[in-house]
Image (cartoon, rainbow, N blue to C red):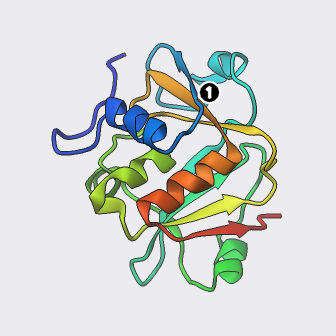
Amino acid sequence: MAMATASASAMSETDIYAKLETLGTAYQVLRHKAITTMDEGKEIMTQLQGCVPANLFLRDKSGVFYLLVKNMGTKIKFSDLEKTIGTTKLSMVKSNVMTDILSVPAGCVSVFALENKSAEKVIVLIDDSIDKSSKINFHPLVNSATVTIDYVSMIEFIKSCGNAYLIVGLK
């Protein structure tokens, strides 16, 4: 399977590491074969500390984009999430739109994509069941590596990109 990459104008994996270092964020990188689904990553998950979230890119009826970072085991109903965040008609974003906004291909969606200028208006929704004292793992804009940071560093990264975020109950 080929490694997924974003467009030439997008931020790169190396840019993400540089940003983490600028922020003073401690991180670990695990290199692995390229994966595009959570099922393909099950073996890799056994080598990681902390939460391996599912990252869903959503849009509501009015065209607002959301990045939902949730525990894999957390079941969600879009209708319940809509009530929680005060919107209507949430749906998954088509891959071509995702690539335009986040500048990453399928399988690479993560908070690190917020570093791309085109993602400046994306609102991040974070599952409140994610342990705030734990590590959390994301692809660094490519699906052939996983970066482990702590929860607080994830919040600091989101803030440094200028994106709004909400901690939401999904149960």
Residue 9 on image: x %, y %? 17, 45
**Mark 1 Cα within 10 Å, few/some/many (few <14, many 20+)?**
few
Q: Residue at 63% x, 18% y: name it.
A: 44
Name the residue: 33% across, 36% down.
Answer: 15
Residue nearest the viewer, comparing 147 with 110:
147
The spot of residue 93 in percent (x, y) is 42, 60
Res 112 quadrant in image: top left
Q: Is residue 114 above or below residue 139?
A: below
Residue at disc 1, secondary structure: loop
Instruction: Tell me which residue sits at (47%, 66%) in the image.
Output: 163
Residue 61 makes an appearance in the image: yes
Residue drawn at the location 61% of the way across and 64% of the way down: 125
Image quadrant in which you'd find residue 29: top right
- Amino acid of disc 1: Asp
Quadrant for residue 124, please give it. Answer: bottom right
The percent coordinates of residue 116 (x first, y second) are 31, 53
Q: Position of residue 11 (x, y in %)?
A: 28, 42
Residue under label 1, please give it.
39
In-image side of 128 versus 166 (left or right): right
Q: Is residue 138 left or right of residue 9?
A: right
Q: Is residue 141 visible?
A: no
